[in-house]
Image: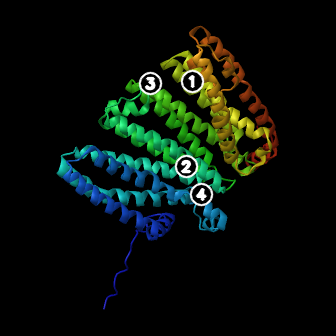
Amino acid sequence: MNAAPAIMDFPDSLSPMVVKELRQGLRTRLFGGVLLTLHLMLVLLTLMSGGAENAAVVSGWFDGIITLVLCIIMPLRGFSAVADELKSGTLDMLALTRLSAGRIIFGKWAAIASQSLLLMLSILPYVVARFVFGGLDLFAEVMALFYKWLAGVVLAAVIVALSTQRQFWLRAVIVFLPLLIGGCGAASFMMMSRMGGGMPPGTLLSFFIKSGGGGSALLVLGIAAWAVFYFLSLAATRIAPTASLLSVVKRSVNLVAMLTLMLVGWLSGSSAAMGSTAVGVLSFLMMDALTERVNEVPSVYAAFYQRGWPGRAALWLLAPGWVTGLVYSALLVALVSVYVGWTSSVEGAKLVAVRAAGTWMIAALVQLFSTRRSSDLLMPFIVFWLLVNVLIALLGNLVLMSFVTKHTTARFTCALPQLLPTGYATAQAADKAELLDLGMLSASIWPALLLIFAVFAWRQARGARQEGWQMIHGHEGGVAI
């Protein structure tokens, strides 16, 4: 008699980390409770929509519940995904299985994304029922449901990246404060959209809504895919071994993504929207590059030296560490400034440089204090960013309001890069050029200070670079850069 075939719930082609996390996630009471509660509420709302002919209140509740589950509850399942592994010491055991840091992080994110996809598919019958009862636009409702799932998986990548930090209170502040602000903003946007309100011009969201068609959908997918890659690679960097060359991959991909964004804006005639988006993306790329520890593993530099002069040139941009990250960020700032100056105005290009100086300011503060000795520079960077932007900039903007009411130029805003854009926007027309020039002069102090710190840090790693050079060119002699 033939033996019964083995029952396989997951194919062998899937990553073992994805299978492990997915099995554990599906067995939790939270997932089962969310699934059961969601379906009970959707059944009631569907019946109500059928009797009330899709009243706006019922539709608002329907959208709100789905958004809550897909964009908040499910992404928050990754709140302690990596922190628990770090505290229990099981991350080293996972590394012994030859799983790379990227595969470990991807497995935790993919499990959350898969569970969210399962919930999204289970919601489709209710969307069809509401279409039958009320004659809604079925395609638009399905696309809206898909975009909610897409936003949820991007948020899940953000939260998984933050879960690499051990401090619970800091993770809670970083996660729940933006969720509160974003939730209020999303609620107001939904109310404005249902009341027929307009979108502010020059934003990426307005570009998507006005353009329509498959091109904008592909652009949304592309930006979402890059965002997931960015945050997952940011998390993988935090737990990767010191000999890892993950920075080469992520910086190359991020540079290509930035160039692609500019190209799309130029070809589509939406340079203003893409320019503002590029400025926002620039801040994230600079934060990633400026929060890497200076690498002192010789084999890392040997990987560049063995490729001759192209490798030595690439070392200045792609080698791990915030020192090369400073050069890399300067290249990105130059690209975005030239793009904005070419497509918009010279004043816009100068403001891009000032905003970049604000990020360099945070990195300089990290290096100025004892936080430079931290094992992970991302944590002190976020703390200083919160202090400067939430406290100092908020107080500065409150003082700025008195100048606005008096119709005078707030010249004190040139002292901080975080205050200058607002001060420039509210300044008198005759004072704008002078205020911007003073602000750029003041902002240039921070990249200059960071450059001084970079020179000392680069010299401290000279021994590792020289040893890496000798690993490749030991018989030739010479000195490493």
Q: Is residue 267 visible?
A: yes
Check whether the beta carbons of the residues at disc 2 and disc 3 lie within 8 A of each other: no
Task: Decide if residue 87 is on the left or right side of residue 189.
Answer: right
Seen at 36% across and 66% down, the residue is 36
Q: Which mark is residue 271?
A: 3
Q: How far, Cα to Cα, is label 1 from label 3?
A: 13 Å
Q: Which of marks 1 and 3 is nearer the N terminus?
A: 3
Q: Which mark is residue 176?
A: 2
Examine the rendered structure and indicate whether residue 37 appears above or below residue 206: below
Q: Looking at this view, is 206 or 29 the one in front?
A: 29
Q: Residue 277 carries which label?
A: none
Q: How far, Cα to Cα, is label 2 from label 3?
A: 33 Å
CA neighbours of label 2 inside 10 A, class few (<14), some (14 to 19), many (20+): some
Q: How far, Cα to Cα, is label 1 from label 2?
A: 33 Å
Q: Is mark 2 on a helix, strand or loop?
A: helix
CA neighbours of label 1 inside 10 A, class few (<14), some (14 to 19), many (20+): many
Q: How far, Cα to Cα, is label 4 from label 1?
A: 34 Å
Q: What residue type is labelled 3?
A: Ser
Q: Looking at this view, is 440 or 267 the one in front?
A: 440
